[in-house]
Image (cartoon, rainbow, N blue to C red):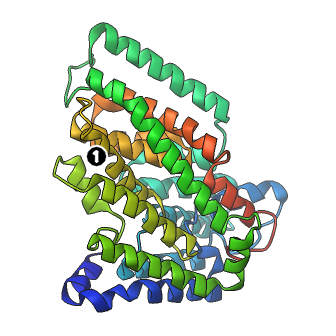
Amino acid sequence: MAAHAHLYAALRWPVLLLLPAGFGIATWLTRRFAPEAAGSGIPQVIAAAEERWRGRWGGQRVTLKTAAWKVVLSAFMLLCGASIGREGPTVQVTAGILRTLTRGLKGGPGRRAIIIAGGAAGVAAAFNTPIAGVVFAVEELAKSFERRTNTTVILIVVISGFAAYALQGNYAYFGVLNGASTTATWIAAPMIGLVGGLLGGLFSRLLASVIGPDGNPITRWRQAHPVLFSVGCGALAALLAVATGGLTFGAGYDQAKALVQGQPGQGLELAASKFAATLAAAASGAPGGIFAPSLATGAGIGAIFAHLGLGIAGRDAVVLGMTSYLSGVVQAPLTSAVILMEMTREPGLVGPLLLAALLARWASSWVMPEPIYHVLARGWRLMPSKGI
């Protein structure tokens, strides 16, 4: 990303051509040499973990070869300025490394446990959030948290937390170490959660309609002309970059960080443009994750609420926006809330974060009944790897 920023500063207009050309090249290389490295990588890990029960290995979904291509192609996409993140790729990369290093060893954890553990390590390493890595493994990869139980647990925790806050304020066992949540934060959390969830569900629905396993005219045309379709996605990303002055380049870390730190930023422009640019990159089929760009989109959504006169602190609104939109996209509320808890180190926001994430998952399910990663994983199950 730093290299792309340097190139863009020196050769602004020629560098914009990197997006359509780079998307096409990355897609061609992926389909030619490593079709299992396509997209985020999380659906491949889910499918590989499930195949243990079918008694077959099937393809190169989590191998060292796929991991190596994933690293190279994801870095290449970032060099071109694509709106992608590294956390989906790191899930597949670490699962592939761990599976390769343990293959053939006798005793110890089974293959499924090794793959899931590797995927969890990928989330932990990408965001420096070890607890979120564990939660992601339980909630998304292992599927051992039945969804209704998951919702019940979060809801009960939120209710008890709100009751405690109402009775005795932001009580902390050893005293408040950081900022405290306010009544305005609790009031704003449901609104931000619903809006972020609906928009996140819309993103997932659109993405599934383009690269999902269910056939429709768009997916059939894409499968017939994958490289041309990818070039078109890159052209759209380039137009968005021109329209926003380069706001859509990369993972969106700098923009999200600026908003979290209370610096002025373009909330609506960031949310809308990042939504579209990330959709274009993910739909291309080239390697790249959606977690980090989703956080940037959510930061923009939160910044909008911070200027609506609700009395909520700007930083709190931005953090709630990130949690809500991410929960809406991946429909993993515990993972989304814990990632932001560990990132911000803000204990006073734990209750509002959980409430916003839960409502976001609920709102997202109206638009997208099944989580996006599990929809995409259907294309990798019970068949030789063919890419997406």
Q: Residue placed at 16% from the left, 51% from the top? A: 263
Q: Is residue 108 visible?
A: no
Q: Position of residue 87 (x, y in %)?
A: 45, 61
Nearer to the camera, 269 or 175: 269
Q: How many marks?
A: 1
- Three-letter amino acid code of the residue under disc 1: Ala
Which quarter of the figure has residue 331?
top right
Q: Which is more toward the observer, 173 or 363? A: 363
Which is more toward the observer, 7 or 42? 7
User: Relative to residue 283, is residue 253 drawn left or right?
Assistant: left
For numbered disc 1, what is the local secondary structure? helix
* Vertical placement of residue 315 versus 176, above or below: below
Q: Quadrant of residue 76?
A: bottom left
Q: Is residue 378 left or right of residue 337?
A: right
Residue that badge 1 annotates? 303
**Residue 33 image position (x, y, % from top left):** 62, 87
Placement of the N terminus among the 4 image quadrants = bottom left
Q: Residue shown at 27%/18% (left/top)? A: 170
Is 388 displayed left or right of 101 in the figure? right
Where does the image place residue 195, in percent across and percent down from the top left? 45, 41
Q: In the image, 343: left or right of 141?
A: left
On the rendered image, what quadrant is the C terminus found in? Answer: bottom right
Note whether 121 is above or below 241 in the view shown: above
Q: Is residue 320 visible?
A: yes
Q: Position of residue 128 (x, y in %)?
A: 35, 53
Q: Pick out the residue farthest to the top.
A: 167
Toward the viewer: 330 or 270?
Answer: 270
